[in-house]
């Protein structure tokens, strides 16, 4: 079983009170410790969220890495391996998909589920209002704006997009 995940490595230079861009590093606000005033450069694994929150931007990727989970044909603890695999798959799925939920008239349900087929199938729940259903489906994040536009044009209402923080799903 192979799972791949790419991560970029950035070099940060920690220095005084301003953010500076240089050719091979990003300077970040704040001293290293109370007693340390010298600049030092440290490698850091970075998703980019911390940099964005600090108002910084990467100027170059110096290294890309890939993590691979390799399963033995005869593991000593197969239950643990299955749990780890399921957790990794869940995080990868959560990063790729978002939950889209909306209300639609039952006579438009077939067209609506063509727009949002879900990872396996959409969840459909009857509403208290006669002839209407609520639909929930996992949608790839990169497609959500277009999907919402199509649902709105079809006549779906109360279209909500909800982030997925983790999941347990079957393999793609």
Image: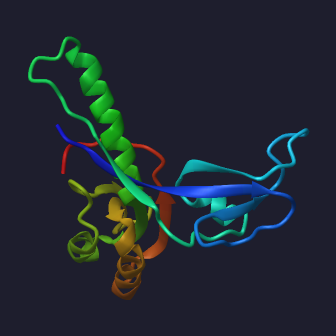
Q: Tell me where residue 93 appears, x and y as whole percent.
A: 34, 50
Foreground pick, 161 / 4: 4
Residue 90 found in image quarter: top left
Please give the name of the residue rendered at 39% of the width and 44% of the height, measured from the top-left corner: 91
Residue 12 against residue 60 in the figure, above or below: above
Please give the name of the residue rendered at 33% of the width and 84% of the height, measured from the top-left corner: 154
Q: Tell me where residue 41 appears, x and y as whole percent.
A: 66, 52
Residue 81 against residue 155 in the figure, above or below: above
Q: Tell me where residue 136 appears, x and y as whole percent.
A: 37, 59
Foreground pick, 162 / 68: 68
Instruction: Say how many tags the image has.
Output: 0
| Residue that lies at the very extreme toward the bottom in this rendered image | 153
Q: Taking 128 as reference, is 93 left or right?
A: left
Q: Tell me where residue 28 appears, x and y as whole percent.
A: 74, 60
| Residue that lies at the very extreme toward the top in this rendered image | 76
Residue 147 found in image quarter: bottom left
Q: Taking 40 as reference, is 3 left or right?
A: left
Q: Taking 54 as reference, is 135 left or right?
A: left
Viewer can see residue 23 = yes
Viewer can see residue 168 = no
Query: What is the quadrant of the N terminus in the image?
Result: top left
Residue 146 found in image quarter: bottom left
| Residue that lies at the very extreme toward the left in this rendered image | 73
Please give the name of the residue rendered at 40% of the width and 84% of the height, measured from the top-left corner: 149
Residue 46 against residue 166 in the figure, above or below: below
Foreground pick, 69 / 102: 69
Please give the name of the residue rendered at 24% of the width and 56% of the height, measured from the top-left corner: 119
The colour style of the image is rainbow
């Amino acid at each position: 079983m192979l799972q791949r995940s790419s991560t970029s490595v950035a070099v940060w230079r920690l220095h005084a009170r301003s953010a500076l861009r240089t050719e091979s590093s990003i300077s970040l606000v704040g001293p290293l410790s109370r007693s340390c005033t010298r600049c030092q450069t440290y490698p850091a694994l970075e998703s980019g969220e911390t940099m964005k929150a600090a108002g910084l931007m990467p100027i170059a990727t110096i290294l890309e890495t890939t993590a691979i989970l390799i399963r033995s044909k005869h593991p000593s603890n197969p239950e643990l391996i299955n749990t780890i695999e399921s957790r990794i798959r869940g995080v990868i799925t959560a990063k790729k998909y978002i939950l889209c939920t909306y209300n639609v008239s039952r006579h438009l349900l077939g067209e609506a589920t063509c727009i949002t087929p879900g990872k396996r199938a959409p969840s459909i729940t009857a509403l208290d209002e006669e002839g209407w259903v609520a639909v929930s489906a996992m949608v790839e994040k990169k497609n959500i704006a277009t999907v919402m536009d199509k649902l709105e044009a079809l006549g779906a209402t109360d279209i909500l997009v909800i982030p997925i923080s983790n999941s347990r799903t079957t393999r793609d």
